[in-house]
Image (tube, rainbow, N blue to C red):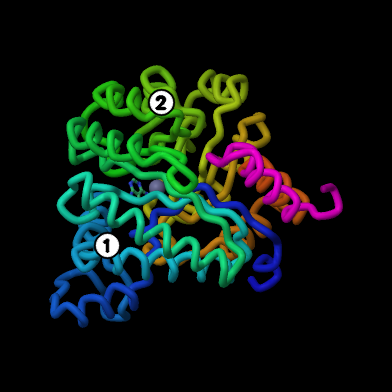
Amino acid sequence: MTGWRDIPKVELHVHLEGAAPPDFIRTLATEKGITLDGVFDGQGAYLWEDFAHFLRTYEAACQVLQTPDDFRRLVEAVLAKSAGDGVVYTELFLAPDLCGDGSAAAWADYLAAMTEGAEAAEAAHGITARFIPTAIRHFGPERATTAARRTADTVGKYVTGFGMGGEERFGHLSDYAPAYAIAAEAGLGLTVHAGEICGAESVAAALDHLPVSRIGHGVRAVEDPGLVRRLARDGIVLETNPGSNIALGVFPDWPSHPVSRLRDAGVAVTISTDDPPYFHTDLPTEYARLAATFGWTAADFTAINRTAIDAAFCDPDTRAAVIARLAPEDS
Ligand code: ADE
Ligand code: ZN
């Protein structure tokens, strides 16, 4: 897999808390004297059996993230790993609901610490990060609206987008339109998880009810040819995470994953890892599997990374600087 490590990469969909290495979580648990029951298997990896169980394990592991400094350390650890994998620009989903007591004051403190972590990682490893504060769908529309307010109030160099993950089977996306309206009003880039656990209708609902330019996953859109044409026509960008989908059993194996078919149908697809240690993956591993399964070449990945940076929630100068790193000879 080392060959794919060197290619400069753009990652648009990685959850900060979900990227925490198990050892990082264990270290914090030991430091704080917290016992984590049922979070790890006998080999020390995260333990989960299906999507609902994955979300429960994820939230249980997050109990050890208690202070701004815990989040600063996590940002630094995650970005160091990404930079080592060849990522030059990344967007981190992070949940204001998991930051202290959820107050505006707590959010300001946690965000300042995470910003410090991102600045340190950029200085040490040359990786540029932006943050996408993310509502947790199964916490309900009211908390999503609060998360959107926190995000809107802190829009700036680092906070550039707003998203929502969590249990896709909870509620209806139209319930979250007020949260997205606040984020849209603040000029944030918008994305939402859909078409991962639920079918094509969930992707259509996202486009019908939320002003998003990107969809997290979205891959089950493949079930509806008309919707695939709509995605292609409207230039909606899919943040696909094939290894995550296969680990969670959304598709049985790599050859049946629709990312290549969607791309062939003209849909803008990008490649990310979602929650890499939970799914035993990283970005070079994803590239290697895609190359082996679909015959994708370095030129295909460069094109996909160009799609990603074009869809990134960043300012024009940052975009231009990243494009120069993707294809130095073209700049
Ligand atoms: N939160 C973290 N990872 C997620 C995923 N794959 N789907 C929905 N919510 C998530
Ligand atoms: Zn995700």
User: In the displayed structure, does residue 295 sit left or right of residue 192?
Assistant: right
**Position in image of residue 2 (x %, y %):** 66, 73
Q: Position of residue 90 (x, y in %)?
A: 53, 53
Q: Residue at x 26, y 59 (%)?
A: 58
Q: For the residue carrying disc 1, how many other residues have a C-alpha within 10 Å: few (<14), some (14-19), or many (20+)?
A: many
331 or 198, which lies in front?
331
- The question of residue 323 being in magenta is answered with yes
Query: Which amino acid type corresponds to the residue marked 2 in the rendered image?
Result: Ala
Q: Closer to the camera: disc 2 or disc 1?
A: 2
Left or right of 240: which side holds 21?
left
Question: Disc 2 beta carbon < 8 A from ligand 2?
Answer: no
Q: Name the residue at 60% across, 52% down.
A: 10
Q: SS class of the residue under badge 2?
A: helix
Q: Which residue is mark 1?
A: 48
Classify 282 as above or below 274: below
Number of numbered discs visible in the structure rendering: 2
Please give left or right for residue 227 compared with residue 173 in the image: right
Mark 2 sits on what residue? Answer: 184
Residue 126 on image: x %, y % = 61, 65
Residue occupying image coordinates x 18% and y 40%? 139
Residue 149 falls in which quadrant of the image?
A: top left
The earlier-in-sequence mark between 2 and 1 is 1
Figure quadrant of the N terminus: bottom right
Q: Is residue 174 left or right of residue 33?
A: right
Decide whether the magenta segment is chiefly helix, strand or loop.
Answer: helix
Kind of residue indicated by mark 1: Trp
Is residue 111 in the magenta section? no
In the image, the segment drawn in magenta is: 309-331
Instruction: Quadrant for residue 194, please give it.
Output: top left
Residue that appears at 48% across and 30% down: 221
Assign a secondary structure to mark 1.
Answer: loop
- Which numbered disc covers residue 36? none
